[in-house]
Image: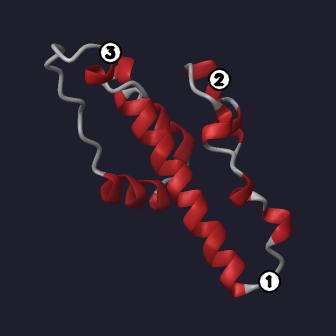
Amino acid sequence: MKLFGAAASEGLRPSDYLTPALDITAVSNDPAKLAALETAFSAATTRYATHIYTGRVEPLSIDANLDIQPKQLDQSALMLELATSDDPAAVLGELRADSS
């Protein structure tokens, strides 16, 4: 959550990731709400990872003549790596478009 809050330092909008669906105070012990929170967190993480890896702007939206294919992110592999990592923020940090 701190990483999403600091997204502006990466040129991203924190509000793209810190959505109302990530309100942990509204969950309590309700299994359905916990599942919805887990799903929302996974979606926010995947969205952040994709933006940090490929950028937010689709090249063709700038100019139809740009023949640039964005890199593809293996989201399943990433989620597995994040789940087993001792430092998920570092895993996401390695995805920066300028570090690959």
| Upstream in sequence: badge 1 or badge 3 | 1
Residue, x 37% and y 32% (percent of image)? 53
Mark 1–mark 2 distance (CA, rounded to whole Å): 32 Å
55 to the left or right of 17: left
Going by the numbered disc 1, the residue's amino acid type is: Asn
Mark sitting earlier along the chain (1/2): 2
Q: Nearer the viewer, residue 80 or 57?
A: 57
Across and down, in percent, residue 25 comes to 86, 65
Q: Is disc 3 surrounded by few (<14), some (14 to 19) or many (20+) residues within 10 Å?
A: few
Q: Which residue is mark 2?
A: 8
Q: Relative to residue 23, is residue 29 depicted above or below?
A: below
From the viewer's perspective, is 63 left or right of 53? left
Q: Secondary structure at mark 1?
A: loop
Q: Residues within 10 Å of mark 2 (few under 14, many from 20)?
A: few
Q: Position of residue 76 (x, y in %)?
A: 33, 59
Q: Looking at the image, is 39 positioned above or below residue 52? A: below
Q: Residue at x 62, y 43 (%)?
A: 17
Is residue 95 in view from this perspective? no
Q: Residues within 10 Å of mark 1 (few under 14, many from 20)?
A: few
